[in-house]
Image: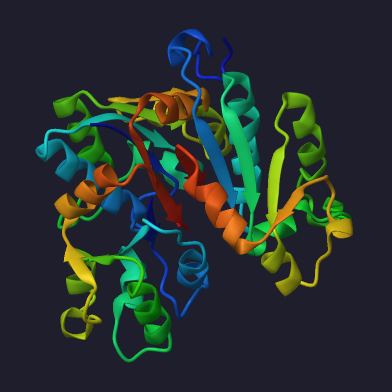
């Protein structure tokens, strides 16, 4: 099945991004396709390449990057929400792309399920 | 449809509101702090047990374990891992997140 | 095609599919940004020729009350935008009766014409959707 994911919260403060990641990983292991992960609201911070967690902690940004690369997942950061929060190409982690809200609507249309993680 | 709830019922009305909007064929999955809604002996236990009579209720076991609540889960609530979460999202035609 | 729609040709990339989208609003405005950014999604959604509905319940009903004056807190008052939705062919706005009553609100207190529904009807509306977005 083709699944779309929406993440509304940033890393570390809320569990949303962790839950979404573990959900996505499990879905891939079961043979489903993650069509797109759309980062909205503070969720755009999940793409900030300047984030440096302590070395004994999970690296939420790089974990998404790797999952995206390994499984050809479109990691889309909302442009309006990103600009509001200072996420630009300069600090965008490789593997993510900044685009418009239409990508979220399209994900809702194209995927068999859209699953939202937020606060 | 599948409803997910990620808030503790002692902090927000999210679970209560979700349970009020269940129709025939709906299921509930408690995740993150929502798993506190799966517990025995709390102020919301009765409300959850009432809903269990008509609807399957699931709780994400990794979140229960993380919070040390393994021995407190209401009988009848089904425990799932992330793989089970995926199965539920696939089984039901739509997913609504109660945030 | 525009920056806002993410460079998507709204007809070509949807393959003519029309799905039922419900935007669920359960949070009050201003204290957090969710209400405003939810409305921004709805405005973009209008370009996609999908079947769009908005639901206001719990504290979400506070989003559509009249008389919002946000100048003193130096935040944009976006409540007039709900009135503009009609111009985007978004006409299905549902407000839950029980949520209004619990907050001492009446239909007259709302900034935009809506359909007031009870919790059971709201549950039916939720159940009948293909895609449910909540923020």
Residue C72: x and y in percent read 85, 56
Residue visible at 89% across and 57% down in the picture = C108
Residue visible at 83% across and 45% down in the picture = C112
Q: Quadrant of residue B7?
A: bottom left
The N terminus of chain C lies in which quarter of the figure? top right
Q: Is residue A116 left or right of residue A1?
A: right
Observer-nearest of C78 and A33: A33
Observer-nearest of A22 and C22: C22
Residue visible at 41% across and 59% down in the picture = B24
Residue visible at 52% across and 33% down in the picture = C20
Q: Is residue A53 above or below residue C12?
A: below
Observer-nearest of A102 and B75: B75
Residue C5: x and y in percent read 55, 19
Residue A54: x and y in percent read 22, 55
Q: Is residue C102 left or right of residue C70?
A: left
Q: Is residue C35 visible?
A: yes
Q: Is residue C30 visible?
A: no
Q: Quadrant of residue B29?
A: bottom left
Residue C114: x and y in percent read 77, 47
């Amino acid at each position: 099945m083709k699944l779309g994911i929406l993440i509304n919260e940033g890393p570390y403060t809320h569990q949303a991004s962790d839950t979404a990641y573990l959900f996505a990983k499990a879905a891939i292991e079961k043979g489903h396709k993650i069509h797109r992960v759309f980062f909205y609201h503070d969720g755009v911070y999940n793409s900030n390449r300047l984030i440096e967690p302590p070395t004994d902690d999970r690296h939420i940004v790089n974990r998404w990057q790797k999952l995206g690369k390994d499984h050809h997942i479109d990691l889309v950061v909302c442009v309006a929400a990103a600009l509001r929060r200072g996420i630009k190409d300069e600090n965008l982690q490789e593997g993510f792309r900044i685009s418009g809200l239409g990508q979220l609507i399209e994900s809702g249309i194209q995927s068999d399920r859209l699953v939202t993680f937020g606060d | 449809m599948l409803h997910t709830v990620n808030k503790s019922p002692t902090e927000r009305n999210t679970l209560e509101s979700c349970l009020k909007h269940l129709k025939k064929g709906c299921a509930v999955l408690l995740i993150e702090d929502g798993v506190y809604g799966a517990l025995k002996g709390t102020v919301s236990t009765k409300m959850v047990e009432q809903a269990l009579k008509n609807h399957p209720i699931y709780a994400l076991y990794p979140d229960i374990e993380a919070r040390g609540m393994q021995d407190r889960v209401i009988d009848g609530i089904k425990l799932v891992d992330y793989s089970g979460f995926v199965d539920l999202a696939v089984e039901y035609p739509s997913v609504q997140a109660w945030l | 095609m525009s920056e806002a729609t993410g460079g998507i040709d709204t007809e070509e990339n949807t393959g003519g599919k029309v799905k039922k989208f419900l935007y669920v609003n359960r949070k009050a405005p201003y204290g957090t940004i969710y209400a405003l950014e939810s409305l921004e999604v709805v405005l973009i959604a209008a370009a996609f020729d999908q079947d769009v509905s908005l639901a206001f319940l719990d504290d979400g009903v506070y989003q559509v009350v009249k008389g919002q004056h946000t100048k003193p807190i130096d935040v944009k008052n976006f409540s007039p935008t709900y009135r503009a939705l009609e111009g985007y062919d978004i006409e299905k706005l549902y407000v839950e009766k029980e949520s209004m009553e619990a907050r001492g609100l009446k239909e007259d207190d709302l900034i935009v014409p809506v359909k007031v529904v009870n919790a059971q009807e709201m549950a039916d509306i939720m159940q009948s959707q293909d895609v449910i977005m909540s923020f």
